[in-house]
Image: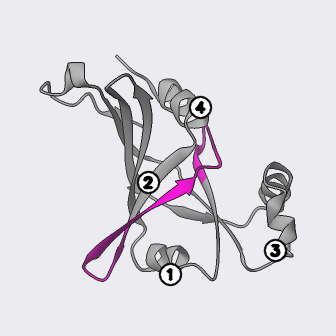
Amino acid sequence: MNTIQDCIKFTNENPLCYLATVEGDQPRVRALGFWFADEKGFYFQTASMKEIPGQLEENPKVEVCFYHQEGMTGTMLRIAGKVEFLYDEYLKIKVLSDRPFLKNFGMTPSSPELILFRIPHGEAHFWTMENNLKPKEIIKF
């Protein structure tokens, strides 16, 4: 049985993910470079000029998919929940340290264009070919 700690480890080790939002009645999905996960949630960074923040303000429900290729198939982790925006200065300093390329865009901890959000609660489940036809083992966090 997988735990939230397994989810944290998997997402931190496989940071390329696909985030699904909704715009009106149209689903939108895009690949993102995931920031990090810890016991408080799954953290993302984007910019105000992107469509993501507006979509999340209108509807904070998301689903994100992480995947690790193993042979012909692999392991997928899907996480669903509601996002919350973060305004913590410590986290803004951390993201600029973790992602120095943001400074090349002129971003600072006080830049309103620097948008942070996380999924603090929700449901997750792993998928592999071996458990493909079995009922999902939902991990609530």
Label 3, label 4: how far apart the Cα atoms are: 26 Å
Where does residue 29 sit, x and y in percent of width and height? 38, 64
According to the image, label 1 marks what residue? 54
Which residues make up the magenta segment?
Answer: 21-43
Residue type at numbered disc 1: Gly
Give SS at disc 2. Answer: strand
Above or below, 58 relative to 139? below
Q: Tell me if I can see residue 109 in this picture.
A: no
Distance between the Cα atoms at labels 1 and 4?
29 Å
Q: Earlier in the sequence, mark 1 or mark 4?
A: 4
**Residue carrying label 4:** 13
- Per the model, the C-alpha gap separating discs 3 and 2 is 23 Å
Of callouts 2 and 1, the N-terminal one: 2
User: Which residue occupies the foreground of this view, 113 or 81?
Assistant: 113
Which residue appears farthest toward the front when viewing the image?
72
Asked if the residue at tag 3 contacts the one at tag 1, i.e. Cβ–Cβ closer than 8 Å, the answer is no
Q: Nearer the viewer, residue 1 or 10?
A: 10
Q: Is residue 6 visible?
A: yes
**Residue named by callout 2:** 18
Query: In the rendered view, would you say 89 is above or below 17?
Result: below
Residue positioned 44% across, 58% down in the render: 19
